[in-house]
Image (spheres, helix red, strand yellow):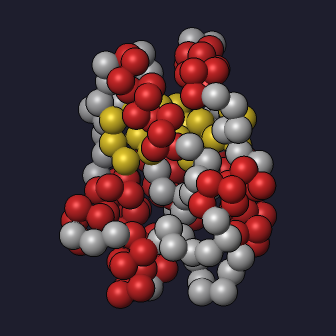
Amino acid sequence: MNNISFIGMAGCGKSTLGKAFSEKHNLNFVDTDNLIESEYNMTLEHVKKKFGYKFVRSAEEKAILGLDKTSQIISTGGSAVYSSISMNHLMSFSKVIYIDTPLDVVIERIGVGQERGLAVPEGMTIAEVFEERRPLYEKFSQGSIDGSKAIDDLIILIENIINE
């Protein structure tokens, strides 16, 4: 089984799918958002409010660069793609899969505010973040799945991608 890193917008399903896939295949699961929250003993939103969005991106890069092939299933934060160093590191030992979830589904899941610790400047809308990040997700993706599908269907799609 190859290592897998999930990229995509907040609310696209990276953590949910990562946990489900790792449980089904008895693999190690790491969520980089959780690593940051544990290190600073606060939510991502609090980290962002206290230190700023650029700090969150830097913390995410540090968390990703600390991972290796023992991290079999990885859910990255939505802003991981702003760091080509992070993405190249992930691609060195894992297959990077973009969970391409339609904007309306993302908004339905997370709302229109920025209470999720989105590592973007204040005042930026979810739609603006979505449009800014989409080309980066596509650039670093080594496979793509539709995040609006059911988890069981997505697990099968991932199995197909990694077995190609």
Residue at the location (41% across, 85% down)? 49
Rendered view: 54 above or below 60: below
**Image coordinates for residue 159, horizontal then vertical, percent:** 56, 16
Instruction: State whether residue 82 is above or below residue 55.
Output: above
* x and y percentages locating residue 130 in the rendered image: 72, 62
Residue 67 sits in which quadrant? top left
Q: Which quadrant holds residue 126?
A: bottom right
56 in relation to 108, above or below: below
Judge whether residue 149 can be spotted in this image: yes
Residue 99 in the figure: left or right of residue 71:
right
Of 82 and 13, nearer the camera is: 13
The quarter in which the N terminus is drawn is: top left
Identify the residue at image location x=61%, y=48%: 12
Q: Residue 120 appears at what percent x and percent y?
A: 58, 77
Residue at (70% x, 43% y) in the render: 100
Total residue callouts: 0
Query: Is 62 placed above or below 31 here?
Result: below
Residue 90 spot, x, y in % from top left: 45, 43
Q: Is residue 23 left or right of residue 130?
A: left
The quadrant of the picture occupied by the C terminus is top right
Report the residue at 48% width, 57% height from top.
77
- Tell me which corner region of the image, top left, top right, bottom left or bottom right, holds residue 55: bottom left
Nearer-the-camera pick, 106 or 134: 106
Residue 58 seen in this snapshot: no
